[in-house]
Amino acid sequence: MRSPLLVLLALLVAGAASAQSELFERLERTSNGVTIKYGLYVPADYDPEVAYPLVMALHGAGERGSDYRNLTVGDAASNGLTTWATPQVQTEHPAFVLAPQVPSGLRWSAETDPTSSDFTPVQRTTLEILASVEAEYTIDPDRIYVVGLSMGGHGTWDFASRLPGRFAAAVPMSGEGFPSQAEDLLPLPIWAFTGEADGVVPAGETRRVIQRLEDLGRDVIYTHCQRSPIGASAFDCPGYIGSDSLAAALDANADLIYWSEPTVGHGPWGPWFRNGLMQDWLFSKVRQDPDAVAITAPASGDRWTGAETVTWTTTRTAEDTVEVWINPTDDPTGWKKVGEAGATVGALAVDTEAIADAGLARVRLYVRTPADRIVGRTTSAPFALDNAGDAAPDLRLDTEALRFDPRLPAATYDLTFIAADAEGDALTAEAFYSVDGGATYVSLGATAILGSAEPQTISLDMAALPNSRTARLRLDLSDGTSTVSDETVSFLKQTPRDVNTFVQQVQGEGEGSVELHFVDEGALTNHRYRITLDTSGEAKTYSVTDLDEGTQVLTGIPLSDGIQESPVFDGIALVVTDLEEGRADADATGWVVGDTDLAVAVSGGTTRISILTIQLLATETDYEIEIADDVVGQSIRLYNIPVTDLRFTVTGGDGQPRDVVFVDGNDDGLPGDGDKLYLVEPNGDGDPALAWALEFDATTDTVLPEAGDVFRLVPVRSLSGEDVFEFEGRFNTSVPVAPRGGLSLQTYPNPSTGPITLAYELTEAASVRLEVFDARGRLVATLADGPAGPGAHRTTWAAEAASGVFLVRLSAQSADGVTESVRQSVVLVRR
């Protein structure tokens, strides 16, 4: 039951909403086959001798009908449409408010690309209503504004783009727009609102219009989230720029604002409509005259120094004023006013020494009326400001393609940039590449370029560079005195490679993988290489030695994430990855004492407890669980799992007891069907944490564990300093191997669907070992191991393994102790 206080509050809110809606005249018009109900607010103390602004407010889909619902639902406190008629707004900005209502089942517009549709009957009738209001009342034709939310936000975009020059400004909220509308919206002041978490009208449907306008030369003020991929949400949202910064931008005549809150969904329209900065901004706007002014100087590529003169032509009268602003940066908030003159004067002297030198400066002109309203603007092409001193060059790197799609599978990449120098000095551009997110870079070479306001490109050969999940490119630009830099965002660089996995693990039991990625076949040496690991530091690393040359070719390379390659050596890049996640050795883990056959599923990856997903430590020590006759201890409490008695002990490989967390379904203290056991070890901070998860499963026929039964958990070991790998630097070991010293080896048929014959020849007696390894370097079969005389030899491998690629290695040690070996790959195909 609702409390009396809540009922009273609800009545007060409803009463306020009702009172607000009663300020509107309720009218209707039938035309074009539809009847449009509409509310009209007439300012208090209306004076027909005064020209008033008008706000046309378009509602959302939920307010459709024929009951003036758009005037009452939520009112100013929620959907905000009637905000414009509140005393707070009308006191500062007396204005008419026109609020049409779309009939049920219809929409403001076709909601398709305007290039493929026409005005709807609703739009035509709404425009007739607007014209009738203008005919009956004194409306300022230069101060008609269109605003709307949701479906009305789409209608706002549509009305404004179909009628360029009709409206003075637009405020679309949570509404879909189309990039094709941007050309017609170029002169129009726009303040667009959206929420990055909007699941009804995604933010990208607003962003795509704003960013297209930016591409066409408009400066955008991003209040919360920056320029982003159209389909992304909250892609680059550093937070609200702050009211002071926004107000400063508005004072500098900002007229394209993208307000997108990262955690907001479809709305909140009331607070947005009540934004005081937006309200003042809106009512300051008048209809733009796109032909009001045109710049004649500076021109593109000019170099200004000392006293210079900005010149223009205008279609306005002497009553208007032209303001001159200069921006020596590409920051939309970097505009500074340097002076003003009568519009028809056509010129203003500027002291460029008071402005920072720049290679890519711009001039912007605003035409302001005696009523202090801007009616037109234009912006010059980039030009140089060159005064005393040697300013650093200007560099603007085009990183948008990688920001919006941070993947680079291609073998080449064109790095696009604009480079200019205020003094016109010769420039040198040097590109760099990083595989670690910009922590370290290697040079890709330098080239001399000419400064220009036009985009230039440097084509980079990416194929020879190591692949990386966090690759970056940087460009340094130098004029011989100063150097400036700009870099891309991190991107996935994944050039396709030919891959060989014939790497033999010659020492250690750690599990990981080693792939040979062939970058330059012409640089392959056919040498033998050895990989050794170092686990003494915070992160595991590896080094590579050329055994034939006795030289170390790589040192201290971090293990890969599966994508990142080592630096390229002898035409090869390595991808050395560790054990992906902890798991039990299936051959060594299980019940080792007793007759029980209770099933145990062991996990060392993640486990889920309630709503939490927990990463297990997967410590690499053996464990034994021994069943006892009676209670021998208690579990510990973690993640709100209660303490329970235990009739078993757990010890680690060091013989020391371990704590456990135990979910005991029947409270008998023993592992049984549905029970879960978590082995506990200290984490990096010394706090108890879950290391392994064991889940027990039984059927009615299961023999349950009894006193004395022992379960052993043996983890698979990850790579360690004991592990050593060897490989040969050859492109394709399935090609017949040329004789090496006194050895030759042939395999046939190859590929094969069954047994494979292996033939080899010795030039002298030797101790021979003939082995077969799988692609991970594990020994599959030993076909010969002992003395053999000179001449031809033949044996057969039964090849009972599954389909795959296998490595055959023949080693022969002569009487004087010299060992030689040859290798060849064979392919087994099962049908």
Image (cartoon, rainbow, N blue to C red):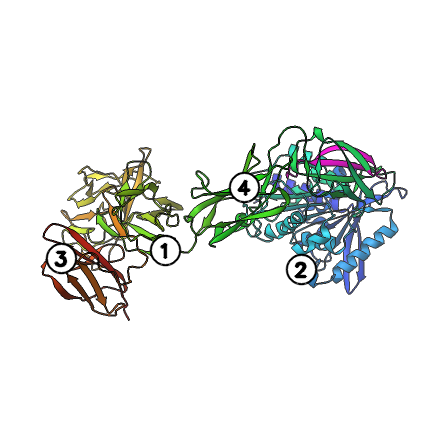
Q: Label 4 to label 2, Cα distance in Å?
A: 43 Å
Q: Which residue is identified by label 4? A: 429
Mark 2 is surrounded, within 10 Å at the Cα level, by few (under 14), some (14 to 19) or many (20 or more) other residues, namely some
**Tag 3 and tag 4, C-beta contact below 8 Å:** no
Q: Position of residue 351 (x, y in %)?
A: 74, 30
Among the 4 quarters of the image, the one containing residue 96: top right
Find the magenta span and give its range.
Answer: 322-346
Mark 3 is surrounded, within 10 Å at the Cα level, by few (under 14), some (14 to 19) or many (20 or more) other residues, namely many
Which circle's residue, 4 or 1, is located before the other in the chain?
4
For the residues carrying marks 1 and 3, which lies nearer the camera in this image? 1
Please tell me the numbered disc located at residue 768.
3
Q: Is 46 located above or below residue 405 in the figure?
A: above
Say which of 218 and 533 sits in front.
533
**Tag 3 and tag 2, C-beta contact below 8 Å:** no
Q: Label 1 to label 3, Cα distance in Å?
A: 32 Å
Q: Amino acid at mark 4?
A: Ala
Which circle's residue, 3 or 4, is located before the other in the chain?
4
Say if the magenta span includes residue 326.
yes
Which circle's residue, 3 or 2, is located before the other in the chain?
2
Q: Amino acid at mark 1?
A: Glu
Please tell me the numbered disc located at residue 521.
1
Say which of 818 and 735 sits in front.
818
Which circle's residue, 1 or 3, is located before the other in the chain?
1
**Tag 1 and tag 3, C-beta contact below 8 Å:** no
